[in-house]
Image (cartoon, rainbow, N blue to C red):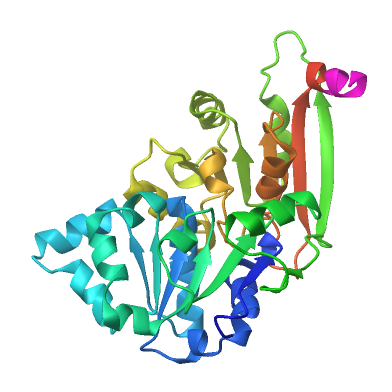
Amino acid sequence: MSSSHICPVNIPDRNGLRGWLIAAAAAPAAVTTRKAAMRFLTGPKGLATSIIHECNDFGLQGLSYCHEKITEYRLKKDDLASLICDCKMWQLICVDPEHLATPEWRKILDHKTFIKNLILFCSIGTIARGFIGEQTSLIGLSATCAPGAHTIDICNSLGLYGDSYHLVRRSNERENMFLTVESLERSKGVSKYARILEYLQSGRKAVIHVNTIPEAYDIYEFLWNHVPPGTSPLHRMQMYHALCTDKYNCETFERIDNDPRLQVVIATVAFTQGINRKKILDSISYNFPLTLDEYWQAKGRAGRNPDVICRGIALVPSSVTKEAKCN
């Protein structure tokens, strides 16, 4: 892909990093040249963790440039910025917009060796062209952007106009998912979370999406009292949200696919942004998210292995469904 063929891509989220690499196929050096540095701009730490994890499947070494990693290298008295500029240790760098605006990254983006090896800039947001030159290919990714004006607005925000870029759109249909929207009716003396238990009784690995952290703790406490006898709640359940430490969230990320004892993850919106774990079979939303896009993102956490049947479940208070019907 030459710099004259800049490409924003609307990719269904189920493809994870693999979908992104399909989009980058026109720039084969991004996959095959181990000394080449690729830039990926990402917000949530969980998304960076997921991407770095998948890099290993393609023989790529990645770095998540975050506070913990910066601290780790400072304690070792290693100059992390210089290591990035050398383009020898990593082929993929994940960094959030806040760190991208620091003096360290201005130094990196001005470094001749780094710029020479910077073959691909994958962007989320409007920040891309302020930091890279026209010589670098730019890819914009979206999993939920609707066709039409919304897509054009995003392209224009990245400085992509007219025929200066290619638009690739793929369907986000999940053929292996059954969707269910259930209206919840309160019964006297019965917990409002009781319906969740009925879906968990199957033993299928599930993520429960909630809108707030207090709600995550309430559901965690409720399920703690209903764990089967002989089973440790600490083995059975994990939470994933912004107040959990990065170490705890990374442990949750690893356990989802590697620990058969873990069945339930209770998560806020932080988990919906690109987390790619193959063993999740059910995505349960307690209360409907604030937007329809958030709902689709949440359902995208289940059934990422296309060979299994997954369920996308929304448990919605009856007052919400009545309001929706009126509107």
Q: Quadrant of the N terminus?
A: bottom right
Would you identify the image quadrant in which residue 133 lies? Answer: bottom left
Would you identify the image quadrant in which residue 90 lies? Answer: bottom left
Q: Is residue 206 magenta?
A: no
Q: Residue 48: image x %, image y %?
A: 45, 60
Q: Residue furthest left?
A: 77
Asked if residue 129 is positioned above or below residue 150 in the image, the reply reads: below
Q: How many marks?
A: 0
Q: Residue at x 35, y 78 (%)?
A: 115
Q: Residue 210: image x %, image y %?
A: 60, 33
Q: Is residue 326 magenta?
A: yes
Query: What main secondary structure does the magenta stretch of the protein show?
Result: helix
Q: Quadrant of the C terminus?
A: top right
Q: Residue 15: image x %, image y %?
A: 66, 68
Q: Residue at x 46, y 39 (%)?
A: 241
Q: Residue 202: image x %, image y %?
A: 72, 47
- Left or right of 30, for residue 293: right
Residue 252 visible from this viewpoint: no
Residue 164 visible from this viewpoint: yes
Q: Which residues are magenta?
A: 321-327
Asked if residue 169 is positioned above or below residue 87 in the image, the reply reads: above
Q: Residue furthest front?
A: 162
Q: Residue furthest right?
A: 325
- Left or right of 176, for residue 189: left
Work out whether residue 292 or residue 209 is closer to the camera in this orientation and state it.
292
